[in-house]
Structures are given as C-alpha cells and as structure tokens.
Amino acid sequence: MKIAPLPSLARTALRLAPAAFAAAAMLSAPALAAPQAKPDQVFRLNPRTNKASTVTGTVTEDGLDNVKVTRRDGREVSIKSGEVIQIAWGSGSTQFTDGGTYASRGAWEEAVKSYQEAAGDSAVREPLRAQARLQAATSLMALAAADMTRFGDVASECDRFLTDFPTSRQAPMVLALKSRAQWLNGDAAAARDGYRSIYDTGKGGADGYSPIATADAAMHAAYAAISAQDNVGARELFDLAAAAYGAIETENATVMAAAAAGAEVAGMGEAITKAASGDAKSVRRTFESASKSSETSAGMAAAHLGLGHAWLAEGDFRKAQFEFAWVAGLDHTSADRRAEALVGLAEAGLAAGEAGDANAAKTALRQVASQYGATPSARKAAQLLESL
C-alpha cells in the first residue's frame, strides 16, 4: 500500500471510540427474549458494500465472534463482531443509567460506583453487565487523569472484566486499556508485554481482533518499550507495526487512512527510538526529511516532534521550542504527542534560561497536568513542575 495518527488508542486506542449507554434484560431469558421498553440499537458496517445499517432489538450475546440480537418479532439476528461499529443500549438497569448520567456530568466517582453495581447485578443480562464493567474501567481512567494513584485501580477493574467476560467483544479493548493503565502507573515493561500479547493474538486473524487494532497494539508496545528502556525491543515492534499497517486492506476509507498514518509513523521507528534514548543529533536529518515528505498529519507531527528533540540535544533551544510549539499547537492526531511536546517546550525554555522562559515552562507543564493527565508524559511533567 502507499504510505499515507500515532494511535493513542487510542488511537487503539486506544480507535480505541466512546461506548453508548444503558439497557438490561434477564440472563435467564428464554430463546425468544422479551422485548424491552426501549430496544438496543446495533450499528453495523457491511464490509462488502461499506454501508452502515442498524439492527434494533435486544442484544443477547456480545462475543468476540458474533453479536446476537432478538428483534421485537422474536427473530434472532447474528452479526459478525467485526462488523459492529457500536451498540446503543436501550432501557436497562437503573444503576447503568445512573452511571451514564454521572459520567456525563464528570462525576466520575459516582459513575464508577453505579457501573460497578450494574456489573455485579445478576439480574442484568451478561452483555450489559460486561458493558457496565468496561464503563467502570474507563470512568476510573478519567479519575486517574487527575489522580495518578488511581491507575492501579484501572488495571484491577480490567482484570475483573477479563475474569468475568473473557469472550466479550470488548476484551481486546480492555486488554489495551489495562496495558495503558500499567504504563501510566509506571510499569512500562508490563505495558509492552500486554500490548505485544494483543498483537500476537491478533496477527493470526483471531475473532474480535481487527487488523487496525492489532497494528495499533504493536505501535503502542513499541512506545512502551522505549519507556522501559528496551530500545532493541522498540525497534522490532516498530517494524512489526509498520508491516501490520501496510498489510491492511479494506474498503473502509477511515481505516485505510489510519493504517497509512500508522505505517508512516512506524517507519520512523528507528529514528524515534534513537531520539528517545539521547541520540537525537544523529537522526535530525531523518526527521527533517520526513517533515517535508510526510503525507499524513500524524507523520508530519512525529517528524516535528523528533526535530524538537534533535535541536534540544544540539543546544539550539529556540529551534527546539519552535518545533515543540508546532506539535503542541497543531497536532490533532495524538494527545500523547501533544503532551510530550509541551514537556519538551518546557525543557527547552528552561535550558535557554532567558527572562520569562521559566514562567512559560511552568505554564506548559501545568497544561500537561490539567489536560493530559492520562498520557505517559504526565508523570515527568509533574516531576519537573515540582522542581521549579
């Protein structure tokens, strides 16, 4: 494919997209599930026609292989999980609905409690309990963005999900979320291994592991390896990610654009690894060339970020500030990159040591704390801010 954003998740994201809220039914329901007051809506994308459609009814199974929906007329429809874009849950448990209300208000502690209650309610059908457990984990991640001591709670909630719902369609997403939480909790090696496991499972075409999520996992593993000071592993993982992105073939233009962007960023893996390990001078020309030839926003932003590190290593602090400011202000593809650029901007300003630079550095670091608490750069920003 022709090489055409760093996943964060999500871009795994994690594409890694927000889930919809609310719905319930009894796990003991017979084959013909009783219709709900407000039905679920399953949004699917036909891989042959690339057209979206909606199936309305009661979701009775949400697995890695298939999603099963009982329509109001009693007919059961089975949809391949890979074709499901999103499920909008209809009427359901009060706790699940309350969790969505609290989350919309940013009341994350209350949201976590409500979702956990819904997830533990045996009267609620399994697909909705799994969704509630996922929402509890993502709400905890929102809490941890403001209190990094809570990242361990996110990983624990993910473990609970994987124990209770190991074959859920959401399992790959939860595995990625757990790895992310471990990384942000200071265990980059565990995150690297977790992401690598997702890649290894998905590369063989396992049900529920889409090609783009599989490639994203390899990319995330590479960056986690850098944080773990595993430069050899990072290079290998960037190569695996580049190959995985390059092998993606689909009629879905959005996925192809993401794959092209991922391939472009992963192609700079050698230079990114060197820059992160303190050898930024030797790869400045690589980033300069990439900044001119990149065909994607993500690729261009990765190149400018690399240039910022290169100029910082060479002692040209003003040029470094320019590159970091470019990424912090213009990169719309990756929160991780924007946060890293803000930290770089602060470091370059402090190194320049001119009037006003210290205050500007504090402003940049506070922005990381307030807006990018769930990124790998947040911990370093906090440490720098404390030292000023």
Image (cartoon, rainbow, N blue to C red):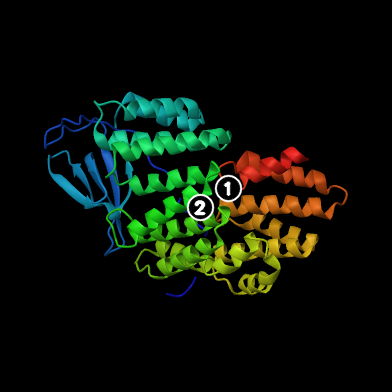
Q: Amino acid at mark 2?
A: Ser
Closer to us: mark 1 or mark 2?
1
Q: Position of residue 353 (x, y in %)?
A: 85, 51
User: Which disc, if any, is residue 157?
Assistant: none
In-image side of 299 versus 113 (left or right): right
In-image side of 372 versus 9 (left or right): right
Q: Is residue 126 visible?
A: yes
Q: Residues within 10 Å of mark 1 (few under 14, many from 20)?
A: many
343, above or below 125, in the image: below
Q: Residues within 10 Å of mark 2 (few under 14, many from 20)?
A: many
Residue beneath label 1, please? 376
Q: Residue furthest right?
A: 355
Residue nearer the viewer, 284 or 327: 284
Find numbered disc 2 in the image and state the secondary structure of the residue it sits on. loop
Question: Residue 164 sits in which quadrant?
Answer: top left
User: Which disc, if any, is residue 8?
Assistant: 2
Q: Position of residue 376 (x, y in %)?
A: 58, 48
Q: Is residue 138 visible?
A: no
